[in-house]
Image (cartoon, grey):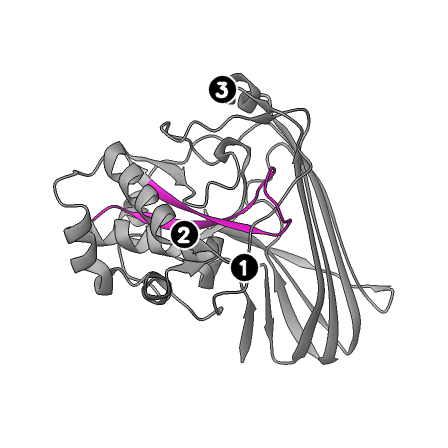
Amino acid sequence: MARERQLEGPAAGPGGGVADEGAAAEGIVRTVGARLVLEVIEPTDLMLQVAPVDPAGVTESLSVACDGAPLEADEVRIPAMARVHRFSTGPGRVEVSYDATVRGRSAPGALSAADAICYLRPSRYAEADRLAATARAEFAGIGTGRDLLSAVSSWVGTHLSYVPGSSRHTDGAVETLLQRQGVCRDYAHLVIALLRALDVPARLAAVYAPGLSPMDFHAVAEAAIGGEWTVLDATLLAPRSSLLRICTGRDAADTAFLSTYGGNVQLLEVEVSAFVHGELPRDDVTSLVALG
C-alpha cells in the first residue's frame, strides 16, 4: 500500500530586498536543496520528487544513504511531469540530500492537445464536477481570459485563511471550501477545481519558492490562457517569477515529494532551502507569469 507524503506548506528562502520583476527574472540564479531523514522499519521502495523537472541549466547532486552506506537511486522521467528518483532499502536510518543551482529560466510551456483533455477533468483533490454550480454562480459573465484567472485567484485568496496544520492530506477542494482554511496545496486545489469547472485547463505544480516563510515545499496552480500556461498563487507568499518547478500533475496525488511502497517508513526530518542570488524580483499580481 502506498503512503504519499504530500506538500503541506510553503517554502522559504533567505532572499534580501525586492527588485523589478522583468530584467531580474531573466538572469535569475536560484540555489535550492532538500534534506530528508527517514526511519525505515521494514524493507521498502521509495520514490522521490525533489529534482527540477527540466534539468537544463541545472548543476545538481543527489545522495542517498542507509546507516551511512550509499544507496543507488534510478532516475525515471515522466514526460512533461516529473523526474522521479527511485530506490529500495532495508531497515535503517535513511538520509537524502539534494542540492541544485539553476541559472536562467526554462521556456514557457505551451498547452498541448493532451493537456487540454487531461487538465479539464475532475481529479482526486480537484473535484471540478462538484464545484460547477459554485463556479458558475460566483464568476458568471467574466469570460475565460486574464480577468477570469485574476478573479478566481483573488476569490480563493480572500475566502480562505492560511492556517498551517489545518487540513488533512486527504482533503480536496470541496473540503477546503467548506472549512474556509488550509495551506498552499489547498489553495491551489480550490483554484484548479474552480477553473476546470469553468472550462479552463488547470493543473498543480510543486515548486521551490524563494522568498517564502516558513521554509518548506510549496504548491501553486497553473492555468492555460492563450495556449500557454500561467502560474497562479492565491497565497501571495512568494514572487511567482522566482518559483522553480519540481513537478507537475493533476493535483497533489501526482506531486508528492516522497512516496513509499511495500514497507513501513517514518519521516523524521524535512529541510528545504530555496533562495535567489541577489534580490528577489517584485511580483506584479496583475501580470501573467509563466513558471520557469
Dot in front, 1 or 2: 1
Magenta-highlighted residues? 199-223
**Label 1: which residue?**
164
Q: Is 241 or 239 nearer to us in this picture? A: 239
Contact flag, marks 1 and 2 (Cβ < 8 Å): no
Give the SS element for disc 3. helix
Residue 107 percent location from the top left of the image: 47, 30
Apparent side of residue 54 relative to residue 90 in the rendered image (left or right): left
Residue 131 percent location from the top left of the image: 23, 61
Going by the numbered disc 3, the residue's amino acid type is: Gly
Q: How many neighbours does mark 3 have within 10 angstroms: few (below 14), some (14-19), or many (20 or more)?
A: few
Query: Which image quadrant for residue 86?
Result: bottom right
Q: CA distance from mark 3 to mark 2?
A: 25 Å
Q: Is residue 258 above or below residue 194?
A: below
Q: CA distance from mark 1 to mark 2?
A: 15 Å
Going by the numbered disc 2, the residue's amino acid type is: Ala
Asked if residue 262 lies in the magenta stretch, the reply is no
**Label 2: which residue?**
188
**Label 3: which residue?**
22
Q: CA distance from mark 1 to mark 3?
A: 32 Å
Residue shown at 54% from the left, 80% from the top: 1
